[in-house]
Image (cartoon, rainbow, N blue to C red):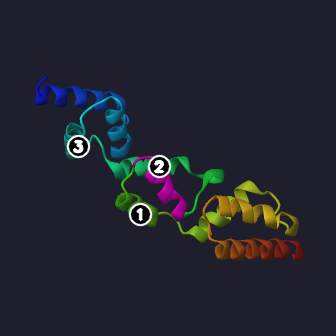
Amino acid sequence: MSITSEFDKARQTAVAFIGIDHSKSSGRVRNKLLTKGVDSSIVDEVIEYLCDIDYINDRRAAKRIVSRYKGRRIRSKRAMVAVFINNGIPFKVAESVASSLEDDRDTAISLCRSTYSIISEESRLDIMKLLHRRGYPADLSREVIRQLLSQTEDSYDN
């Protein structure tokens, strides 16, 4: 088989995998082509070609991933970098998109409020565990819990 026909076949496979929403990352497309047995040099050419024509756009893919992590699924910026990388987004793009996300303090507060209807001293440990699982640093978690508890106490005082 000639190089151009291998390229065309790999390109068609990639386009079929990406579909009409254009939200697959270059890493996911690369892995799909490699599992189909396409030579790595041809995979690189196909990825480069599809990126050049904006059929693959890692920033667009990352923003699509961000849209799935709202409400009770919120993660810290650090955790989102890991999510991006697991979804085939290159590290530099992952860091760049994560740095543009909402501040960790704000997302931690939002996560706590969406998960716990009542923030109390009894739920402190559970909240701490939740924030830890979602990638928030311990010191930030403690500050957020203190802030939420003081706001709860203030609302009872009024």
- Checking the image for residue 64, the label placed there is none
Residue at numbered disc 3? 44
Q: Amino acid at mark 3?
A: Asp
- Which amino acid type is shown beneath numbered disc 1? Glu
Q: Which residues are magenta?
A: 77-88
**Crowd around label 3: few <14 · some 14–19 · many ≥20 (10 Å):** some
Assign a secondary structure to mark 1.
Answer: helix
Q: Which residue is mark 2?
A: 86
| Residue 74 image position (x, y, % from top left) | 60, 56
Residue lying at 79% horizontally and 61% vertically, measured from the top left: 126
* Residue at the (58%, 58%) spot, across then down: 75
How many numbered discs sit on the rendered protein? 3
Q: Residue at x 32, y 35 (%)?
A: 34
Q: Position of residue 124 (x, y in %)?
A: 81, 67
Residue at numbered disc 1 = 95
Whole-angstrom CA distance, mark 2 to mark 1, is 13 Å
Of the image marks 3 and 1, the number of the one nearer the N terminus:
3
Q: Is residue 20 visible?
A: no
Q: Is residue 97 left or right of residue 151?
A: left
* Residue 78 highlighted magenta (yes or no): yes
Residue 49 in view: yes
Q: Secondary structure at mark 3?
A: helix
Distance from Cα at disc 3 to Cα at disc 2: 19 Å
